[in-house]
Amino acid sequence: MIDFIGKRIWFAGASAILVIASLLLLTVGPGLNEGIDFTGGTSTTLQINDENVQTDDVRTIFAEAGFGDALIQSTGGGSFFIRTEVQNEAAQNDILAALNRAYPEQSANDIRPEVTTVGKSVADDTVSNAIQAMVVASIFIILFLFWAFRAVSAAYRYGLAAVIALAHDVFLTLGLFVILGELINAEVNASFIVGTLTVIGYSVNDTIVVFDRIRENVRLGTGRSFRAVVNQSLNESIMRSLGTSFTTAVVIVAMLLFGGATLRDFLLVLLAGVIVGTYSSIFIAAQVLVF
């Protein structure tokens, strides 16, 4: 039997370092790569049927239309993703005209910009709603755990331990997305919020599985210390947690490989959440409960 509880200081120390690193990345570091759902602006997906087109060529075209500070990312095969401040209809016509001047030999069907615009007020509402959703979710999780474990002594400790593990998961996921934003331009957008709320549910579900086994073993009243009961419960439930998480991760990876760019950021959140949530339910939530 593995002594998980005996190593709780190591687990807590490792998680504390990772959480602090995530906070530094979010505050002092580059921060999250916010999409237009959060900042407001216009995103343009541009497909030019010419594989020789370079990022600098597209930058020149957008600068000619008055968007010299556009953020441009090449996605290969003459495809580009561009973010600018809000474009009105006249600006979009200027960009299209600049494209036609730059590539007169191509027909209108060969140059296909797809434009999405989000106003600043809508972006502010998105941020506010996202924060409210996470707060409400956390409150209901605590209330549910209070009710589910009401027959156990000091049931509130189970709820608090689960929420601490939940906060741990969210911070680590945010820190990871700062890194992914720098490496592959992963964005924090509406899909990210949906993914984060899904991660919250998955993480709490995994934690409840472990806590339920602890509750069952406590009820047996074997006379052993609470620490020994928790350690036994972790050993009994770890394979179930790992098995469920592995099969879930396999499906997410398959969708990442074949699902296309549209779902990428959402799936990355889910994958990070599954990994971090499994870790926290075993090595954080139960350890916090013992503390």
Image: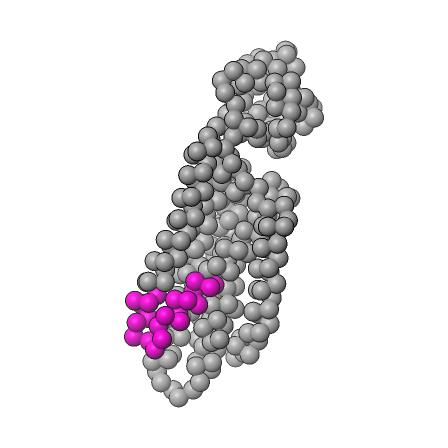
* Residue 122 found in image quarter: top left
Residue 3 placement (x, y as % from top left): 54, 78
Q: Position of residue 2 (x, y in %)?
A: 54, 77
Residue 233 position in % (x across, y down):
44, 75
Residue shown at the point (39%, 88%) measured from the top left? 223
Whether residue 12 is visible to the viewer of this picture, yes or no, is yes
Specify whether residue 71 is painted magenta. Answer: no
- In this view, the residue in front, 42 or 223, is 42
Seen at 55% across and 56% down, the residue is: 172
Magenta segment main secondary structure: helix
Q: Residue 127: horizontal and vertical position, in percent? A: 45, 42
Taking depth in this image into account, of 42 and 199 the one nearest to the observer is 42
Q: Quadrant of residue 65?
A: top right
- The relative height of residue 207 versus residue 273 in the rendered view (above or below) is below
Q: What segment is highlighted magenta in the picture?
A: 145-165
Q: Is residue 291 left or right of residue 201?
A: right
Q: Residue furthest bottom?
A: 223
Tell me: residue 256, above or below residue 52.
below
Q: Residue at x 43, y 62 (%)?
A: 163
Residue 103 in view in this figure: no
